[in-house]
Image (cartoon, rainbow, N blue to C red):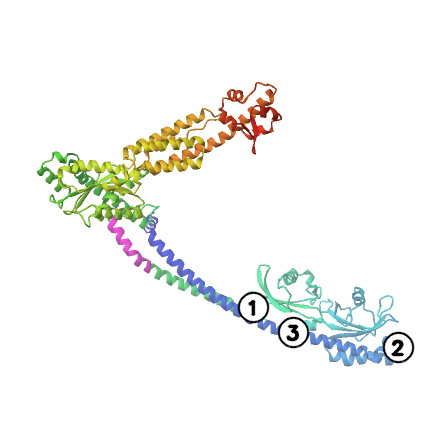
Amino acid sequence: MGLMRRFQEKKYLLRIFLWMTGIILLIVVSFSALVYVNVENKVFKSEYENSRKVLSQMKYNIDYLDTMIRNITLSTYGSNDVKALMYLNDEETYEHLNVINKLNATIVANNPFIQSIYIYNNHKKLYYSTLGDLYHKDEKLDKALQGYGSIPILKAIVRSSSEAADRRADGTANTVLSYVMYETTDRENRMDGAVILNIKLDWLVENIRAINQIDAGVRSELYILDSENGLIETDPANPVVASPFASEVRQAYEERGDGAAPESGFFMRKIDGEKYIVSYIRLEKTGWTLLDAKPYKEAYANLMQLLDTIVVITLVIFAAALLLTLSVSRGIYSPVKRLLEQTSGGNSGLTGAQDEFSYLTEVYRKSREQLYEYSLEKNNNTGIMKLYFLKRLLVDSFGMSGAAFDEALRSLNPAFSVDKPFLLCVLRIDRYKSFMTRSLVERELLRFAIANITTEVIGRSFVLQTVDMKDDSFTILLNLEIGGEAGEVVQLLKEAQSYIAEHYHLSFSASVSEPIDTYAAIAATYSHTFANSSYRYALGHGSIITQGDIESQAGRIDIEQVLEQTGKFIETVKKGDAEKSEEKLRELFRQLRKLDYGDILLAGMQVVHQLKKAVFEMNRTRREPILIHANLLGRELAEEETAEQFEERLLEAVRAIASEGKSAAAEGNQVAAETIKAFIDSNYFDSSLSAADISDMMKLSAYKLSRSPRSISACPCRSTLIRFGWRRRWSGWKIRS
């Protein structure tokens, strides 16, 4: 438990150690692997070059042997003495027997790879042989020849030897290669006469092994494939047919996947759990393929030793790197260790889910919260007193004595001068309803930022005191220079607005008073300045309001003109023209912003009232009533901070009313048209029927009836319509004027 706890308390140290160890291990392993791969590639390349040279030499020698055997067969077949024996019908004489002796003495004796020579006589259906008896019957040769539809000429035919004198010590028959030369065959596909050379396959295999220079210390298996990729028997004592290893080598050769099947090459394959290198070469003249399989670990024993050496060196370097890493990790960790000791007093207090930096972060967070609480408590106490003295000035300055004013002023800021004029600024947070949705801590931080940044910006040029009024407003009291104006203060307020908007995504509006020459006027000026801040409703968020702005903006138009414009707007809404309604509404609000603040609110509420009243009136003559938009029913309109927001909400309601009115009017017109048409179809024979009767029955005005839908033009009784005062126009039936 103690060891585990120590590891938990030093997670960061362990992390440094593991990261450095992992990086060093990665570098060392990558370097070792790179060295081994490069050496392996060079060894493989060298082995391939050697194998290619050896295989090429083997191919050359085997092809040369094949050519030599063909030439011997052809020269023997062309001998007149041989042909005389080949086509002999009579009894053999001494001269005929001497031909066999000459072949045995000249060709067989001088070519150790030749086992025997046969001369086939088709008339006597027998072979004259240089091995054993003169008259010879070779059933295995006959059987091998019968397996061909057309007996191949001068091609090696692999078969077992039938000669009793040519057997192994264990009694098994040797494998021979028979080269046949003939010209014609009879009707039974028998050769009329032929010369057959039988070659010792054992001799050929031994020479191939000698050419291949097989190391006696390396296991190697040699196999020969015929033109059909069948295994040729080279060792009757160990038949390849019964060897699973030989079958897997042949299958691996067929599946080697080298595309165009090159004449020679090598590949690696795992057989029976052991890795083998198989070299191969194709012989075009015979159609054979030589396969030589060597164990990888024996053929590349030096490479395996190199791998072992690289592994040992890697482990040694890694062990040394571990010691170095441990020392470096402790050096890197020592500042963290000292910091932990300083913050924890010897007891780290880490939990299992923490590391050192998580613990330090938690300590820092708690410390910051404590400092914030201490600072907040201190600021609150100071702020309460400053708010108290400022409220005395703002509420009761006219009743204060000079001594009391001096005391309140010194409490706010000792740098204030009684001899200089004062200026008041009222700051109000924009979108205060959204601001109140933030957390308490965030709200307090943002309020502090607004007060602090504004104080710092304006404080570069003026002596001032900013007090948070604990609502959406802040009050700034500052000294102006004698004869100074508020213009520079306005520019500094804009600078503070820009900074707060950029960094805190928050805006505020400000109202700036006129210069105050006597302290007794501070209370009245504050009341007037705070009232002026309400003109944010007309000027918009982020505005800086001065008395000059209000005089140039408000009171330039009479409220009666706005109410008259409201009536025009309502009439447009009743007609259902959405575009004109929007245009009239925007024109109405352009005029509404020119009113005094109180009149703006009154006119706005009057617009809402008239709009709801218009909807009620429109619904009296509609089959489907228009629903009053939610914006007209809720209190959100009255809570909007600016006329622009009020206008946008009202515009949403106007668009919805126009959309519903248009669809309801179209549906109502269609119903009226169908009713009028049905009524006329049923009563067209009544001579007293008139447009006035229809109007009274439908409770429609004559004007609206005259604009009834075009569908009544399909009425079958046109003459009756004309009689009732209707006339045909381009688009339908219209009542005559």
- Say whether disc 3 or disc 1 marks the residue closer to the N-terminus: 3
Q: Which residue is mark 2?
A: 92
Q: Could you tell whether 140 is left or right of 442 in the image?
A: right
**Residue 429 at x, y percent in the picture:** 28, 40
- Residue in the picture at 27% in, 38% down: 554
How many angstroms separate mark 3 from mark 1 (CA)? Answer: 19 Å
- In this rendered view, identify the residue nearer to me: 334 or 297: 334
Q: Residue 435 colored magenta? A: no
Q: Could you tell whether 189 is left or right of 315 in the image?
A: right
Q: Could you tell whether 105 is left or right of 60 in the image?
A: right
Q: Quadrant of residue 272?
A: bottom right
- Say whether disc 3 or disc 2 marks the residue closer to the N-terminus: 3
- Residue in the picture at 56% in, 32% down: 729
- In this rendered view, identify the residue nearer to me: 103 or 313: 313
| Vertical side of 605 occupied by 505: above or below | below
- In this rendered view, identify the residue nearer to me: 663 or 128: 663
How many angstroms separate mark 3 from mark 2 (CA)? Answer: 43 Å
Disc 1 marks a residue whose amino acid type is Ala
Q: Quadrant of residue 636?
A: top left
Q: Residue 331 colored magenta? A: yes
Dot 2: within a 10 Å radius of its alpha carbon, few (fewer than 14), some, or many (20 or more) residues? few
Q: Quadrant of residue 471?
A: top left
Q: Which residue is mark 3?
A: 58
Label 1 element class: helix
How many angstroms separate mark 2 from mark 1 (CA)? Answer: 59 Å
Magenta-drawn segment: 327-343
Q: Which residue is mark 1?
A: 299
